[in-house]
Amino acid sequence: MSNFEQETQITGPDISKSIFGGVLVYDGAGHYPGLELLNLVFGVVNEDLLPSTEKVSVRKRAHDFARRIVWDESFSDLDTKQKVLFNPETEEAVRQLLNCLQLPIPSTSKKPGWDRAHFFPFTQSLIHWDARKRGGKILVERKYLRGGGALVYHILRKDNNTERLARSRAGFLALYAESEQSALEKLANTLLKQSYVSDSSNEDLIEAESVLFNDEDEELLRDGVVNILEHHELSAVARIKALISWTAFWLLLIQHRRASKFLGQEHSFIICDCGSSHVQLRRASQRCFKDIENNILNASSKASEGKELKDKQKNMLRSFFWASAATIKLLNAWRGRRHFTLGLELTETLVLAAVNKSSEIPYEAFVDDWLFEKCKLVIGRKAAEKSGLLESFDSSVFEDNENHFAIQMQAAGLLTEYSDATRMVGTGGLK
């Protein structure tokens, strides 16, 4: 490539940082930003888990030994295996156990290679970075942990609200406290000792390049994280799952909102079909999905004016949105005719992010004041009215949608209806 071509071309990650504040590309979609966030929180070389320093240094670990035992059939390092595994039967038992800890990969049903598979961070010693084997050596890389989690981490640690920042630090510190002496943590830690860990802690440049917007969306992220971490009435696993899901949700939220702002449009919103069987609503949700995708593409084109941005690079940004939405069940399917919905786990995540500790909030406040005003999810009649949708829809469509959503939440233990017909949202049914 000539120097002129290099000067006139621009990449998807560069465009993403200019519009959204961080690198939001397809390879790093879905659960990967949450994994990246935990790697930065617990890998940082600092007494504070969320240091307010200008830059952070991170010690990265690959967990390559355990991952290759499970997902690399050609792995035959007998000397290392014999150090920690009693016999072949022990190795097989460990392999079967670790295989159950794999982070789901919704885009494929094939068995992944070891460098494609990640452990879900049930315990702290299961947290690990991307890794590759190159030239006979194991190296950590950014293949799937591309920068979405780095943006979230940057926003959390740069919180000017010192009281909330202290609560975030305490919440992360307590996240794995109960599992420190568990059998799984001891096994993971033993296997981790046979894996590659970066010798020196280097500054994370991707995190340092993340951009703060200092807007209400970043306040929403911080409040949601604190609320999730402080749900001590729930298990650590429930909090970890919600944290990973919330990270993905918030990133796709800012992607579509900041794309519309960049284009000079009014705030975009997401029309959710909660299964009320209205064809008109389903079609509106499908159109909404396509409109958001087009906004992301158009914003990418506008940001690249004067330079060449290839279609493949633009599609990387658009694909982050739909892949993240499909992974956390904000979309009904990975492929085909897609519309917005709210899966059970995502609904649980949104409740944990909205409600502090063991408190409750009225269902109407949850749907109207939080899901719509904060997250721009259109479910009920009031949200539809504020979004201008009642000009072309009968209000009963959204009333039915809101009631159907309430039934789903009640069945999941997230909503309690009292004798005076008051409906309250909380985590009481999850304990």
Image (cartoon, helix red, strand yellow):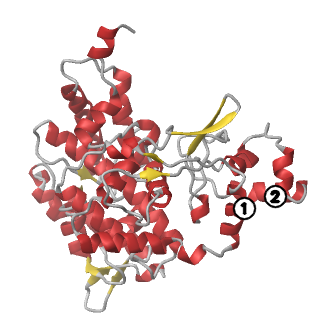
Q: Is residue 87 left or right of residue 127?
A: right
Residue indicated by mark 2: 84
Residue plotted at (11% across, 40% down): 265
Q: Is residue 344 visible?
A: no
Residue plotted at (38% across, 40% down): 320
- Circles 2 and 1: CB atoms closer than 8 Å: yes
Q: Secondary structure at mark 1?
A: helix
Q: CA distance from mark 2 to mark 1?
A: 8 Å
Q: Quadrant of residue 402?
A: bottom left
Residue plotted at (36% across, 84% down): 358
Question: In the displayed structure, would residue 6 be above or below residue 293?
Answer: above
Determine the residue located farthest toward the front in the rendered image.
200
* Near-viewer residue (230 or 297): 230
**Percent position (x, y) of residue 82?**
87, 53
Residue type at numbered disc 1: Thr
Question: In the displayed structure, would residue 168 be above or below residue 132?
Answer: below
Q: Which quadrant: the N terminus?
A: top left
Residue type at numbered disc 2: Val
* Near-viewer residue (333 or 235): 235
Residue indicated by mark 1: 190
Q: Quadrant of residue 219?
A: bottom left
Residue plotted at (21% across, 47% down): 257
Q: Is residue 180 left or right of residue 268?
A: right
Q: Residues within 10 Å of mark 2 (few under 14, many from 20)?
A: some
